[in-house]
Amino acid sequence: MVQYPQGRLDASFAALSDATRRGVLERLGRGDASISDLAEAFQMTLTGMRKHVGVLEQAGLVTTEKVGRVRTCRLGPGRLEDETAWIEDQRRVWDARFDRLEQVVAQRRRKEQDDGHAKRS
Amino acid sequence: MDTRSAAEDTTTMDRTTIERTSEQELVVTRTIDGPRDVVFEAWTDPELFRQWWVPKSYAMTLLSCEIDARVGGGYRLTFDVGAAEPMAFFGRYLEVTPPARLVWTNEEGDDTIVTTVTFEEDQGRTRLVVHDRYSSKEALDEALASGAISWNDETFDQLDELLVDLRTSSRR
């Protein structure tokens, strides 16, 4: 019953299934970088890194911009939020859930009280 | 009881808190207005459970909810998530001690998560502690990473709307 809301997220999950791509996101979290910076940091060929960045770009996790001969990568709109933000989001889900639980419990008690009166009367 | 004022206590108790208490554990707490036998029933009776488990803004609709809250009994929730196949969440109850404690497994994923819920009554109110234990640090990290992405788009806005509604309707 542990549930994480799903959307059109297959691309994101696929993108995150690879350790290098997760590393690239981590690296971009610290600042923008060019493809060649990234290739060097992860000891890969430019072609290899371009493929990884392409997958991340398709998932909306990274955006790239070519200025002159340099393609700069940065975290995209679907970027990873930090753990604290996620935990706060979960807290709000639970908060909403518990508010409804409280309503259900209140209804239940009213019903029990009504039943109780009915029996006594 | 400590020496803080009652009002302050109530505020603190009401709020839902969530904390990663270790590499493998997430703990959610909240105090619900109502005796714990009723609160416990709301966790174990499928008709009651389905009324509150899924926040309205969730990007999924609960299709079915089976709960057999006995040790060794199973539960199964299915959701319409807009895909061809419904998504199922399922597991088994490891411990059922009414109205104090529930332990179940979450077996839908690669890693089994064990959830423990405790119910403590205090003057007509029930303190809930929901404890999720992941099989490894990596499993929890991964859940955190996927969750962070999931909650980025309009789901977030819907949740905001819901919370505004709830706040408005719960001012009493």
Image (cartoon, coloured by chain):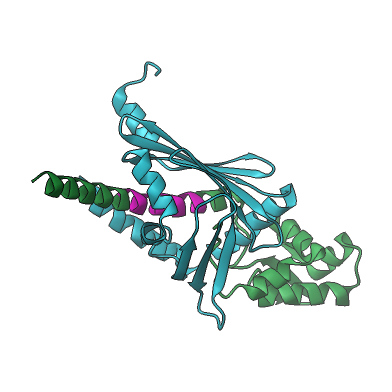
Q: A6 or B133: nearer the eye? A: B133
Q: Residue furthest left?
A: A121
Chain letter of the cyan region: B
Q: Is residue B66 magenta?
A: no
The stretch of residues the image draws in magenta is A89-102
Which residue is found at the position 12% from the left and 43% from the top?
A120
Q: Position of residue B164 (x, y in %)?
A: 31, 56
The x and y percentages for residue B41 are 39, 49
What residue is rendered at 37% in x and 41% in y?
B37
* Vertical side of B140 occupied by A64: above or below: below
Where's residue B145, x and y in %?
65, 58
Q: Residue furthest bottom?
A: B84
Residue at the location (68% across, 55% down)? B112
Q: Give the camera-side residue of B37 and A43.
A: B37
Q: Is residue B97 visible?
A: yes
Q: Is A45 positioned to the left or the right of A86 in the image?
A: right
Marks counted in the figure total 0
| Chain letter, green in picture | A
